[in-house]
Image (cartoon, grey):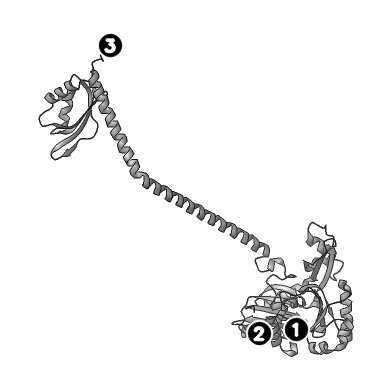
Amino acid sequence: MIRGSIGLLLEDGRLTVVAFGGTNRFVHFVVDDAEDPARALDAELRARKLFERRIRVGVDRRSVVVKALELPQASGGDLGKMVAFELERHVPFPPEEARYSWIELPSAADGPRRLLVAAGGRRAVERPLALLAGAKRRPAAITVACHELSELLPRVLPARLAVWAHCHGTSTDLLLLIGRTVLMSRSVTVSDTEALAREIQRSLWVVGWNHCDAVWISGDDAAARIAAPELAAAVDAPVSSPPYAPGPGALVAQLPEENCGAAQLALGVALAPRRPALDLLPSELRPWTVSRAQLVRAGTLSVTVLLGVAFAFAHVGKTERYLGRLSAEIRRLEADANAVDALAAERARSRRMLAGLESVRRGTLPVLLVLRELTEALPESAWLQNLSIDPEGVELVGQADAASQLIPVLEASRWLERVEFTSPVTKLQGKEQFRIRAAWEALPSAPPAPVR
């Protein structure tokens, strides 16, 4: 059941309303012979607490023209202009006053392009608009009421040829359907079963059928017409009630007998989709709804975004797993790397020591002389923790009461020059910790190689 939906049938000066509101409430009422129909409609809706702002309007089939048009399959360009041009020959009002809508019908691949067009004059549309404006409501759609009877059928039906005769008041609307698809509609006035059979036969000729698979009767006095054996014999097809869907069928059973035909039309209008196939309401007044194409585009965009997000998360997860494995491998190799660094440092120290020993052996570094001179020159308050001698110079690491006083002492040496601190002087247990580097001032040349 559709909640918050109101269907209104305009039939001469009579308004038939079927509405859903509240908690599964099903409401039916009629506004007839009212001096001000708009105010009476508003009062009835308010009395029943139906505050839906938009109302679906169904107009009587007799107030519109419904035609099946055929266009060439190769026809291109603006289809609306082509329909308007073809429609000029079929409507009894000026073309500029026509309000029309159309849908494409199933057609053979090698046959003409078939359209079902519904058209009404300017008054056919302006009258319901003025009525709803007076009732302080807005239109949701303006459709041909009898075409919405197909909303009472199941969503899936066999593709058989059917004629639906719906009686309301003095009129009978004839619908010709394949499954749920309306191919054509007519409004006729019949006085008996024989006249109804003749009109059904004429309707078959309009759509090019030579027979039908079923005849459905609904509306006023439907039971009596179904029971008439001459109707089935005349149309050579089984006659029965329409195969209503379970939900709409239960609602049809609740309609009052005295207004069954008009109320059933209003019920179909109330159950119509938000975007009916044939809508005479001007496009600028239609409520915004999401079309199937927009849904497809939105779905495609959503899937694309989701795939992009999923890919991004998958990429991030893959990268994090790789970085995790890389970090674990680095931690595993860290101990080996530290051992290699320690070996490299030890190798460097060994190389420097070997270079110094080699220099001593070759007599190029005055190691003993420098040691003797340092021993004599350094004050007694200074003592060395480490002494490094290499071909580049001498490095002293130790402690003294005043480290800065060592600089002139070392500058006075005949072996050293460019004496300087290589790191800041720090205090440690009352002493100044120092690191001093000095370059060689003059080195004895290496003895010549023996001549052999």
The residue at which mark 3 appears reads as 450
Of callouts 3 and 2, the N-terminal one = 2
- Residue 76 in the image: x percent, y percent? 80, 57
Amino acid type assigned to the residue bearing label 3 in the image: Pro
Circle 3 packing at 10 Å, graded few (<14), some (14-19), many (20+), is few
Amino acid type for the residue under numbered disc 1: Ala
- Which residue lies at the image location 80% right of the left edge and 61% below the top edge? 81
In percent of width and height, residue 163 lies at 82, 78
Sequence-wise, the earlier of marks 2 and 1 is 2
Question: Which sits earlier in the primary sequence, circle 1 or circle 3?
Answer: 1
Mark 1, Cα crowd under 10 Å, few <14 / some 14-19 / many 20+, is many
User: Which residue lies at the image location 31% right of the left edge and 36% below the top edge?
Assistant: 343
Label number found at residue 27: 2
- Tell me the tag on residue 262: 1
- Where disc 3 sits, the SS reads loop
* Separation of marks 3 and 2 at Cα, in angstroms: 129 Å
Residue 108 lies left or right of residue 254; in this view the side is: right
The residue drawn where x is 14% and y is 23% is 372
